[in-house]
Image (cartoon, rainbow, N blue to C red):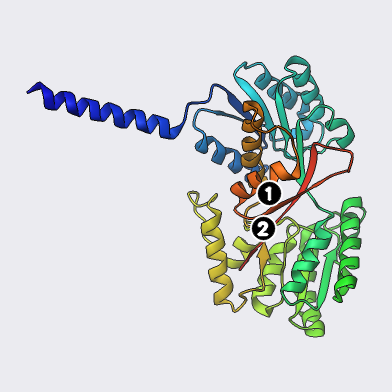
Amino acid sequence: MKKPFLLSAIVMLVSLMAGICFAGPAKDYRIGIVTPTLSASEDEFRGAIRVAKKYPGMIKHISLPENYQEEQETAITQILSLADQADIKAIIIAAGYSGILPAIQKVKARRPEMVVITAPIWDDPDMMVKYIDLCLDTDWVRRGITIPEKAKKMGAKTFIHYSFPTHMAKEVLAKRRDTMKATCERLGVKFVALNTPDPKTGAGSTPMLQFLSEDIPRQIAKYGKDTCIFGTNCPMQDVIIAQALELKFIMAEQCCPTPTQGFPAAMELEITEKDAGDFDKINAMIAQKAAAAGCTGRLSTWPVPVGYFFPEFATEVAMKMIEGTLKEVSVATLSPLAKDVAGVDVYFEKMKPELNNYYLIVMDSVFY
């Protein structure tokens, strides 16, 4: 009577051990991820939550103060608290804020071996690379090439750039506009730069959005449906995409390329809390709405928000750094890891030729 019980026990033990071996050994370290709050920056926050679910027990996620600009000392203290925990071997800061470098300097003074990845922060790049193992950001200027090139492939003969004076006073945005113009000239696409009312002065966004609602139909009547419209301001995207659904022009990419900018409002998508980070499902919903509007192939963006992508990608890089399997940071070593996370090719370029640990990215697109 005991033999069947013993045999069953052995089978259960072997199965359990096989499961443990298949899952791999537990990590003996943790990784800290720093983001804004959910309300301050949804993508980074949800990206960190996704990583915490992917690696249960390994991730310590903290959120910086809601009013970061007025509470930078609190933020520095929070980041330093991660360095005080001996089992935390890497800190990833996906915040998009400036003024964080002093915290990193203090972390490195206490824990020189700590892996620190910013994805991104906006302090002085030449100072950052002295203290940070890897710096990541979007290649905002290079998008001045990639967006018109994509628009041309989508059939654009005209490229309209909507902006306003306070935006064009920003060097990176002006440089991107100039790059877009030069790219359009190279491609044989007519480039048109138009100013809207400035939302940073006067009555806010309302006059700007009203102007777009009235002017876009005029421009499409003038240049035809094979026109790509690009706006430099986030609130513009709701109007641009809604007008694209009606007028059938091309929207190759928003100012911040993500399925969750402009599309949900313009298409009246019902995205539940459960589906908020499911970009395969969100992209399928957008494609279905585009098809219903007769706009298939006329709308595009990046398949996941860069803010959602960076926490997971940076975690994968940090793990390999900690475990010694990433011997050097380079395009060759980063690209395969990025594709595994994003599901599409991600292209890396050094911010400056002499900076070996500061990379800017652009991502392949999803077409609806």
Secondary element at image label 2 = loop
Question: Residue drawn at (36%, 32%), measured in percent from left and top?
Answer: 18
Q: What is the x, y in percent for residue 368?
A: 61, 68
Q: Quadrant of the N terminus?
A: top left
Q: What count of labels does the image hold?
A: 2
Question: Residue drawn at (67%, 37%), measured in percent from left and top?
Answer: 36
Question: Residue drawn at (69%, 79%), measured in percent from left and top?
Answer: 247
Q: What is the x, y in percent for residue 136?
A: 75, 41
Label 2: how many residues lie within 10 Å, few (<14), some (14-19) or many (20+)? many
Between residues 270 and 291, which one lies in front from this camera angle? 291
Q: Which residue is mark 2?
A: 302
Between residues 166 and 302, which one lies in front from this camera angle? 302
- Amino acid, disc 1: Val
Q: What is the x, y in percent for residue 272?
A: 49, 53
Q: Within the image, what quadrant is residue 226 found in? A: bottom right
- Asked if the residues shown at circle 2 and circle 1 are in contact, with their CB atoms under 8 angstroms apart, the answer is yes
Q: Rounded to the nearest whole Å, what is the CA distance between mark 2 and mark 1? A: 8 Å
- Amino acid, disc 2: Trp
Between residues 65 and 230, which one lies in front from this camera angle? 230
Q: Within the image, what quadrant is residue 295 found in? A: bottom right
Q: Within the image, what quadrant is residue 76 found in? A: top right
Q: Which residue is mark 1?
A: 306
**Residue 185, relative to residue 119: is it above or below?**
below
In the image, 290: left or right of 240?
A: left
**Residue 278, relative to residue 114: is it above or below?**
below
Secondary element at image label 1 = helix
